Image (cartoon, grey):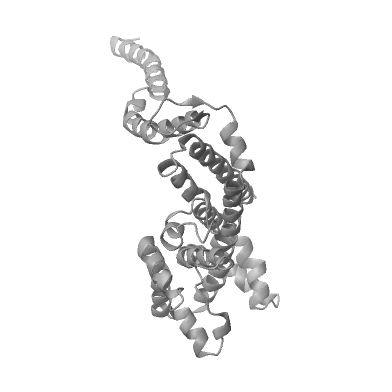
Amino acid sequence: MNRTMIQAVNTATDSAPRRALTTRARHRPSHLGWLFLIPALSVYGIFVLWPILQTIRYSFYSWDGVDKPQWAGLRNFRAVFTDPQLTSTLVHVAELILFFTVIPVGLGLVLAAIMQRVTSRRVTSVARAVLILPQIVPLVAAGIAWSWVLSSSGVVNQVLQAIGLRHITRAWLGDFTTALPSVGLIGAWVLLGLCTVLLSVGMGKIDASLYEAAVLDGAGRIREFFAVTLPSMRNEIAVCVTVTMISALSAFDIVYITTQGGPGNATMVPGLKVYQLAFFNRQVGLASALALVLMVIVILCIMPVQSLSRRSGDE
C-alpha cells in the first residue's frame, strides 16, 4: 500500500466519527431557542397568568379594594350559587347562548349553502360584504343604533303600527319579557356575518365529486345538504360554535350599551355583574369568585365541542 492510499484510509477513518459527532450535535436539543421565547412568555405571564392567579387569590377574601383583605374561605363561591341575583345571571347567559350560537350557526349554514349555489361572483361578493358589515361596525355604535330601532318610537314599532299590529308595540329593550330576547337578537345579528363567511369558505373546500355522486344517487338539494355538506363541515361548525359560545358567555358591551342589565335584573349577565361588583359595589372578592365560575363554565362548554371536532378530524 503506497503512502497516498494510507492517507486516504486514515482520512476516511477519521471522518466517520466526525460525521457521527456532527449528526449528534445537530439533533441535540438546543436550549438557545428558549431565549427567543422569553419575551413572549414574559408578556403572557404578566398580562394573563398573573391576573388569573390574583383573581384566584382575591376570590377567597372579602375585600373592598382599599382596606386590608379579610379571609372569607369559600363564602364568595357559596354566594355565587345561592344569591338569586347572581344565579340569575348564569341563567341569562345560558339563554343568550341559544341566540348567540344557534341562530348565527344555523342561519349561517343556510345562507352559505345558498351563496354556494349562486354562480354570479359579484352577487356573492356583495352578499359577503353586507353580511360581514356588523363585524366592522363597533359594538358600541351597533348597540346605540339598535337601541333607537327597538325604542318605543323606533322603526320596529312604526312598522308594526303600519301593518295594524299596534297592540304588540312596546319598548322592546325596556320590557321585562322582551329585553333579553332583544339583546340576544342583536348578538345574533352581530355574529351572523362571521359565521356565514367562515362556513362559506368551508363549503368551497368540499370535493365537487361528492356532490356529483349524490346527484347520481338521485339526491335532491335538501338530502344533498344533509348527506354531503353537513358531514364535511364539522370542523368549521365547531369553530363557529366555539367563537359564538364564548361571545355569549363573555357578553358585556352589547348588554351594557343597550340595557345596562335592566329592566331590573332582566338582562344582567356575569360579565356585567363582575364589573358592577368590582367597581361600583366594591366587592372585589365576590366579583373574583363570579369571574372564576364564569371561566370554568366557558372551559366546560368549549371542551366537548373541541373534543368532538378533533374526533371527527381523526376519522
Residue 277 picture location, percent across and down: 47, 43
Q: With 143 as the anchor, is 93 left or right in this view?
A: right
Q: Is residue 119 visible?
A: no
Question: Residue 148 versus residue 203: which sits nearer the camera?
Answer: 148
Q: Nearer the viewer, residue 296 or 173?
A: 173
Q: Is residue 197 above or below residue 155?
A: above
Q: Is residue 204 left or right of residue 34?
A: right
Q: Position of residue 101 (x, y in %)?
A: 56, 60
| Viewport quadrant of the N terminus | top left
Q: Residue furthest right?
A: 217
Q: Is residue 130 above or below residue 40?
A: below
Outermost residue toward the left?
Answer: 4
Q: Residue at x 47, y 50 (%)?
A: 272
* Image mark count: 0
Residue 289 visible in the current orientation: yes
**Residue name at image x 62 percent, y 36 percent:** 78
Q: Residue drawn at (37%, 61%), measured in percent from left and top?
A: 140
* Residue 303 position in % (x across, y down): 60, 44
Q: What residue lies at 53% left-to-right and 64% top-to-bottom?
A: 184
